[in-house]
Image (cartoon, helix red, strand yellow):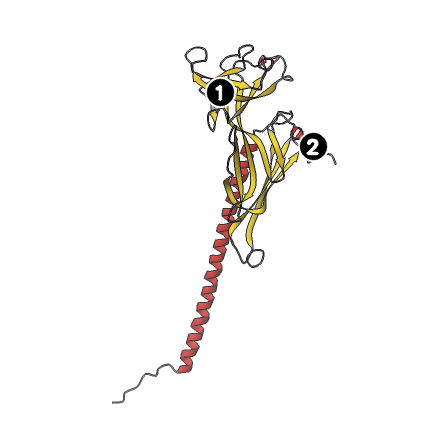
Amino acid sequence: MEVRRRRGLSLLELVVALLLLGMVGSGVTAIVATSLRSVRRQAGRARIQASLRTAVTIVASELRELGSGTSSGDLIAMEPQAITYRAKRSTAFLCRKPAPRVPEITVWSDPVYGLRPLEAGRDSILVFAENDPRTSEDNEWHHAMIVAVINGPACPGPARGIRIRLAGLSSASLAGVERGAPVRGFQATRLLLYRDARRTWWLGLKEYRVGSGWSITQPVLGPLAENGLRFEYLDASGRPVGDSRLVAAIGVTVVAQGSRPVAAVAGAGGMMSDSLSTHVTLRNRWPIRADPDP
């Protein structure tokens, strides 16, 4: 009986098979690595865009309530990469007309809208004066500092109220203030671009308190690019202006970047970045025309 021996692989065939397997494996590895890099880039881009939307929303919501047009407007200091302003923190309404020759107003304790109640030494206020009810041309907002906030039943009837003692507001100014007038509470606040100890740039916020000065800068959002926060101050015609009384709108540009270098972006070691801009129109000013005069 004849026995046939099965022929095995030769060394050459084995080497060729290993080479082919290595080539296929290298191709698959390259495809997977490329896909992972693409996913990481897309995820990084999504994080940057989310940061941009959040930053612009925060800045716009802070600046949208600002007013200008008078020497006591809300803009305190204007810089290319920082802005100091009176930030709205609460809104209340007068429950009685102010008494003559008394620097004090009384508001309902409910409703009070905003982030927090009024605080003496921390907030200032704007009180709306109707003056002549037959015309709106003499309406104005009067600015004053809060000396004391006293909770109690100071409103007519059973409604509870809040008495606010003021400084820097004359009795003549209060003469045009009527029951139901709105009162806006503000705190001096500063938004700025700053760099932390790790040399990373952030959108930061500081608040001012009477007696203790400015707080430590708190990071709000980041990381940002080195020039990742820019403010532009425009008048009613859309032209840059340096006088806070003439500011009708504020342009805001935020440039966010990733936290890790991406070799495929802007050369080896480059940072992925993106930018977003918006304009915020201030109160008591005209809107910017679409086509300003040259």
Mark 2 lies on a secondary structure that is loop
Mark 1 lies on a secondary structure that is strand
Q: What residue does disc 1 label?
A: 148
Q: What residue does disc 2 label?
A: 237
Q: Position of residue 113 (x, y in %)?
A: 48, 25
Q: Amino acid at mark 1?
A: Ala
Image point 61% across, 30% down: which residue?
A: 75
Residue 201 position (above or below residue 176): below
**Position of the N terminus by quadrant:** bottom left
Q: Position of residue 38 (x, y in %)?
A: 50, 56
Graded by Cα atoms within 10 Å as few (under 14), some (14 to 19) or many (20 or more), the crowding at tag 2 reads: some
The residue lying furthest to the bottom in this view is: 1
Task: Please give the label number shown on residue 118.
Answer: none
Image point 51% across, 21% down: which residue?
A: 147
The residue lying furthest to the right in this view is: 294
10 or 229, nearer to the observer: 229
* Quarter where residue 289 is shown: top right
